[in-house]
Amino acid sequence: MSGWIAIAGLGPGDEALVTPEVTDVLGQATDVIGYIPYVARVAPREGLNLHPTDNRVELDRALHALQLAADGARVVVVSSGDPGVFAMASAVFEALEKHPEYQDTDIRVLPGITAMLAAAAHAGAPLGHDFCAINLSDNLKPWDMVEHRLRMAARGDFAMAFYNPRSKSRPHQFERTLEILLEECGPERLIIFARAVSTKDEAIRTVPLGEATPDMADMRTVVLVGNAATKRIGRYVYAPRSAT
Amino acid sequence: MSGWIAIAGLGPGDEALVTPEVTDVLGQATDVIGYIPYVARVAPREGLNLHPTDNRVELDRALHALQLAADGARVVVVSSGDPGVFAMASAVFEALEKHPEYQDTDIRVLPGITAMLAAAAHAGAPLGHDFCAINLSDNLKPWDMVEHRLRMAARGDFAMAFYNPRSKSRPHQFERTLEILLEECGPERLIIFARAVSTKDEAIRTVPLGEATPDMADMRTVVLVGNAATKRIGRYVYAPRSAT
């Protein structure tokens, strides 16, 4: 029996945003591996082994997937959103590089609706012009690099999407992010806090940067920042197709 | 009867990448509006009016959708990929702003798998770290702005995704893009040409920048550029989760 790994994106939460490709591969799986709340989204069934693990053990989880596939298992590694955007796909390739004995593993990545796309859709079209996606966590990169990227993105007048804007262990960084944005973009620039997008807890709030406060974001929030031309029309926020 | 507009993303081509949310809304529609090849992806049925239109008439198309919805139609405006990423969502909000008589229209945006996510998935995980999306067409913005954004993205060491890299009417701009990237990122930086992603014509080719030539991209290509840490492992290309 020949095993494989599919690294699959479950989308931001709503089951209607899971692609048929992902639903199909979950139906073929013998094993599902991932962070506890994502594995909890997969329906249990006879013959399917669920392996929920805690946060911050991405490389162990990836190695476990490689080992299971080598033993013939059909393994789906699940992420929320898209597995290639601040999620498990890079971790699996890192594990593959560290463990060349698994180099012949059949690995596919199955894209998903990443949080910023669902957040943008539910807010209007704030990513309708050139934009950047930045992970604000400094668990895996120096904070100086985050600050530098924020400034480059602002000076290029990119719209921006921030993942992992704020956590209990690093409460001051999002405060600093807002300071930098205010300095670079001014108080009128629109900022959107999209919490728990596409779930029953969804809440979307848009304010000018001058009114934004750090507590508007938490771990379940994706933050979107407009470019210089971004505006409101009724309850929608959008970036015009033409530059200013 | 109360009309509405849903601006829906059909994904990059493969029907297995169309979300159930979009399939469901197409089943409720009375009218489908969009660029000819995208409307051609919607199955005809009794009671469904298809309105395929040519390229570059986005605002006319958006106004038509608003008019039909005002008359009670259930209108789906279709884009390929995600409707909020260089597609129809911004055009509909622009039309709404120009025509305030339609301000009470019920409008929803339904996200889709945008080309760069499918391209990244099929290449490995080249967007696994911070990245930018840039539309290289200067139809709606000055070319100088594109050059400036390329430099800011490179200096921030963002991975990059380019939409509309090259067309017959502007053959020299992608050549200029490659020159700028070579200057800013050096000849070893990896660049991925992903053509017709998720269709039967899919072709993905990765080369170092020093070997990239303008003819590697056409209108059906999404181009991805790695960051300084991006590497190959076997047939995959990925951005490590840690910065260099």
Image: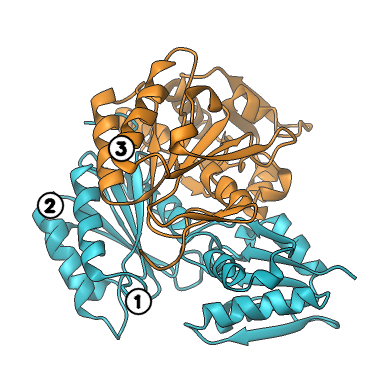
Chain colours: A cyan, B orange
Q: In this picture, is B120 found above or below A97?
A: above
- Residue at 30% of width from left, 31% of height from top? B146
Q: What residue did someone put label 1 on?
A: A139
Residue A15 in the image: x percent, y percent? Answer: 63, 65
Q: Numbered disc 2: what chain? A: A
Residue A102 in the image: x percent, y percent? Answer: 70, 70
Q: Numbered disc 3: what chain? A: B
- Residue at 17% of width from left, 64% of height from top? A178
- Marks 1 and 2, how far apart in space? 25 Å
Badge 2 and badge 3 in a common chain:
no
Q: Nearer the viewer, mark 1 or mark 2?
A: 1
Query: In the drawing, what numbered circle is on residue A206?
Result: none
Query: Count of labels shown?
Result: 3
Q: In this picture, is A31 found above or below A124?
A: below
Badge 1 and badge 2 in a common chain:
yes
Q: What residue did someone put label 3 on?
A: B150
2 and 3 marks in contact (CB < 8 Å): no
Q: Residues within 10 Å of mark 2 (few under 14, many from 20)?
A: some
Q: Nearer the viewer, residue A216 or A27?
A: A27
- Residue at 14% of width from left, 60% of height from top? A180
Q: What residue did someone put label 2 on?
A: A184
Helix, strand or loop at disc 1? loop
- The amino acid marked with disc number 3 is Leu
Residue B33 in the image: x percent, y percent? Answer: 58, 29
3 and 1 marks in contact (CB < 8 Å): no
Badge 3 and badge 1 in a common chain:
no
- Marks 2 and 3, how far apart in space? 19 Å
1 and 2 marks in contact (CB < 8 Å): no
The part of the image, by quadrant, that contains residue B161 is: top left
Q: State which quarter of the image contains the C terminus of chain B.
A: bottom left
Q: Numbered disc 1: what chain? A: A
